[in-house]
Amino acid sequence: MKRFLGLTTMLLAGAFSAEAQEYVDLNYHFNKGELYELEQKSKSETYMTVNEVVQRTTRDYNNLIAIEVTAVEPGKAILTFRYKDLKFNFNAKNQNIYVDAKVSNDKEPFQAGLKKLLDQPFSVELQSSGIINKVDGLDNLLDNAANAFSSLKQDEQEAYKKLMKDQFGTAAFQGWLEQLLIMYPAHGIKTGTQWEESVPLRGGLVGNVDLYWNLQTWDAQTAKIGGTAKIKTDKVQMLTLDDDIKATAEIGGNTTSNYLINRSSGLPSICVQNTDMSGVYTYKANKAKHIKQDLKVPVKVVTNASYKIKQMK
């Protein structure tokens, strides 16, 4: 009888052990002084149909960012970011701006502005769950970089400042970082588990992003996670678009993501994302802008992006 009980106890212990191994705890874990390198490559195309004329705008990024863990506290870490390489290509309304921040170009003022961002530190306070508490210091860097436009005409200065803020400002930066960094659940999960979070839509548009993730596979070193973001704007909020046009936006769409996670840090070693959005801008009547009455402007946005993060130290 004792032998039977002993065997039963061993079998139950084995069963509980196997069940426990099915669950994995995922979170961000850093040590002070660690260094990472983030490579960003993305291409975004926007199509707007104004008075039956299609306007195409493209934005290409090829950036390299150094990330240093400068402080670790219970439940959070301070990560210091520095742009090491900035390549940006903007094409709209027969205007093309190509900038490599490291290569001087006296004919392109935006180059001088982006050059001022290189190697300048700004910080991100990141919870171990992946929630971003704040991005600090980036707007000050942009204010300093905008001094590069001081010799331009006032309207040109404002246009360049808006372009820089829209592409590299705090809201834009936090917006893409929130979709790059997974927000992990507080408890252990197993293969097939799905979870979600919601964040504000940042960087020009007003609305919400509902983020959904699912754990596909995992082992001792890595985890594969699929993600979907459902994007929806607030259709009554007023926006200021290019050329100082006032408008509302009724736009929605999805981002699909695939992540390979490094479990030791929680950061994605690789992330591939594809975004497809469409809807309508409503330009508000404005005689100064030659808009006689509210104008419906169909819009479509397609973005393809890839990210790689590797530990350097």
Image: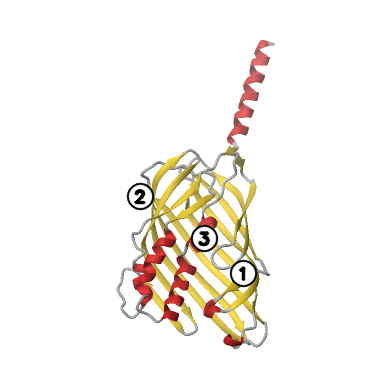
Give me the disc on residue 176: 3
In space, the residues marked 1 and 3 are separated at their CA atoms by 15 Å
At 36% from the left and 71% from the top, the residue drawn is 147
Packing grade of label 1 (10 A; few <14, some 14-19, many >=20) is: some
Q: Earlier in the sequence, mark 2 or mark 1?
A: 1
Q: Position of residue 307 (x, y in %)?
A: 46, 59
- Disc 3 is placed on an element classified as helix
Q: Is residue 95 above or below residue 113?
A: below
Q: Is residue 272 shown to the viewer in this render?
A: no
Q: Amino acid at mark 2?
A: Met
Q: Is residue 107 above or below residue 141?
A: below
Q: Quadrant of residue 61?
A: bottom left
Q: Is residue 175 shown to the viewer in this render?
A: yes
Colour pattern:
secondary structure
Comparing labels 1 and 3, the label whose residue is closer to the camera: 3
In space, the residues marked 2 and 3 are separated at their CA atoms by 23 Å
Residue on which the image places disc 1? 277
Q: Quadrant of the N terminus?
A: top right
Q: Amino acid at mark 1?
A: Met
Q: Earlier in the sequence, mark 2 or mark 3?
A: 3
Between 135 and 220, which is closer to the camera in this rendering?
A: 135
Q: Earlier in the sequence, mark 1 or mark 3?
A: 3
Residue on which the image places disc 2? 312
Q: Is residue 149 above or below residue 178?
A: below
Q: Amino acid at mark 3?
A: Trp
In space, the residues marked 2 and 1 are separated at their CA atoms by 36 Å
Between 12 and 230, which is closer to the camera in this rendering?
A: 230
- Disc 2 is placed on an element classified as loop
Q: Position of residue 293 (x, y in %)?
A: 67, 85
Comparing labels 2 and 3, the label whose residue is closer to the camera: 3
Q: Quadrant of residue 8?
A: top right
> Residues at badges 2 and 1 in contact (C-beta under 8 Å)?
no
